Image: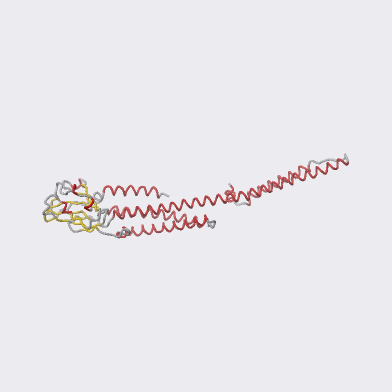
């Protein structure tokens, strides 16, 4: 599986997005159209001074305009901003020319409304503009619920399929461990898991690409990205654990089968050898005793060596025949087990 490598690539992309924020992702040309000193924000690809509702983790650029001109000196009291204010701020890149633009990340931290005009230090008495309402959500709610996009449904469906395949392989593994295994069925479940594993990773990559393009808008894309990373990683971990347990169960089952077949096969061979040796030795010994008794009674007695050689030759011939039968009649899979 290539899930581990894909996961590593996804983690690098996500961490990069978290580090740079959305100001550098699809930044919109600064558009100042304000009556008097007004704070405007690039929300959802449009500069606006209207009230907005954003989720925690949303990131956008913030400028201060007067008419059609943006302020070109530090206009935000950045040193006075702390965690309790509900947002974090840093200077944006130089792509806006001489205009001083800040990148803001909504953190919430208990704040439900943020009026950025309150943090202005230039023409503060006249300032107005953008106010953000921090959206509240159920702590247990899935952030993906807020994303209206086909790739979300495809990802969630693929994740569910992988969860089902993981559970099926776990059941098959339990049957193997209990001695009630159907090898073909278990192998089918393993192939199913492998297929759904790859499909979920592909769907994860698709939704990640979509969310990265939307990072910073009002849809809470950063929270959704974090959720995708968390639950996809958890599902892959469960699948990997199921595969590892299956492999251990199969290894143990094969070891037990080898032991059983070896005992049956070599036990039978040993018993046959013992009987053959006994018979091969007994016949010459009986013949020798008869000759010995006859010699006592008469000197006109001879001992034919064929009496001893014949059983040995017959025993050797039977051993060769047995080896041929074993190689021809016994299935190759059984010989593999024996090895």
Q: Is residue 90 left or right of residue 125?
A: right
Residue at the (18%, 48%) spot, across then down? 80
In terms of depth relative to the viewer, which is nearer, 131 or 7? Answer: 131
**How many discs appear?**
0
Q: Position of residue 27 (x, y in %)?
A: 23, 51
Give left or right: position of 86 versus 272: left
Position of residue 226 measured from the top left corner of the image (x, y, whole percent)? 32, 53
Quadrant position of residue 94: top left
Residue drawn at the location 43% of the way across and 59% of the way down: 164
Of all residues shown, which one is farthest toward the top?
299
Q: Position of residue 73 (x, y in %)?
A: 14, 46
Query: Of residues 10 and 267, which is closer to you in this image?
Result: 267
Q: Nearer the viewer, residue 293 or 87?
A: 87
Q: Residue at x 50, y 56 (%)?
A: 174
Q: Position of residue 221 (x, y in %)?
A: 28, 55
Q: For this rendering, which residue is in front, 156 or 227?
A: 227
Taking the image as shown, residue 106 lies to the left or right of residue 271, namely left
* Coloring applied to the structure: secondary structure
- Where 18 sits versus 136, above or below? above
């Amino acid at each position: 599986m290539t899930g581990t490598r894909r996961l590593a690539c996804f983690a690098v992309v996500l961490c990069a997005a978290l580090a740079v924020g959305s100001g550098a992702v699809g930044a919109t040309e600064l558009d100042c159209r304000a009556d008097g000193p007004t704070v405007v924000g690039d929300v959802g690809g449009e500069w606006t001074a209207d009230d907005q509702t954003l989720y925690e983790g949303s990131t956008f650029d913030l400028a201060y305009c007067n008419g059609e001109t943006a302020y070109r000196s530090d206009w935000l009291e950045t040193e006075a901003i702390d965690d309790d204010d509900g947002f974090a701020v840093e200077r944006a890149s130089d792509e806006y020319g001489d205009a001083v633009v800040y990148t803001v990340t909504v953190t919430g931290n208990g704040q439900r409304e943020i009026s950025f005009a309150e943090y202005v230090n230039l023409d503060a008495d006249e300032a107005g503009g953008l106010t953000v309402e921090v959206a509240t959500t159920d702590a247990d709610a899935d952030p993906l619920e807020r994303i209206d996009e086909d790739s979300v449904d495809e990802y969630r469906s693929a994740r569910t399929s992988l969860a089902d395949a993981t559970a099926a392989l776990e059941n098959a593994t339990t049957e193997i461990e209990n001695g009630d295994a159907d090898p073909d069925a278990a192998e089918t479940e393993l192939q199913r898991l492998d297929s759904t594993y790859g499909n979920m990773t592909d769907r994860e990559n698709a939704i990640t690409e979509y969310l990265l393009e939307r990072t910073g808008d009002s849809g809470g894309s950063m929270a959704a990205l974090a959720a995708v990373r968390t639950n996809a990683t958890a599902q892959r971990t469960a699948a990997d654990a199921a595969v590892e347990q299956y492999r251990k169960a199969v290894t143990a089952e094969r070891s037990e089968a080898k032991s059983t077949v070896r005992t049956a096969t070599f036990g039978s061979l040993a018993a046959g050898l013992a009987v053959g040796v006994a018979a091969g030795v007994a016949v010459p010994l009986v013949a020798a005793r008869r000759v010995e008794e006859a010699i006592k009674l008469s000197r006109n007695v001879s001992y034919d060596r064929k009496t001893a050689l014949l059983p040995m030759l017959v025993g050797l011939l039977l051993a060769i025949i047995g080896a041929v039968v074993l190689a021809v009649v016994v299935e190759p899979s059984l010989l593999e087990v024996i090895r």
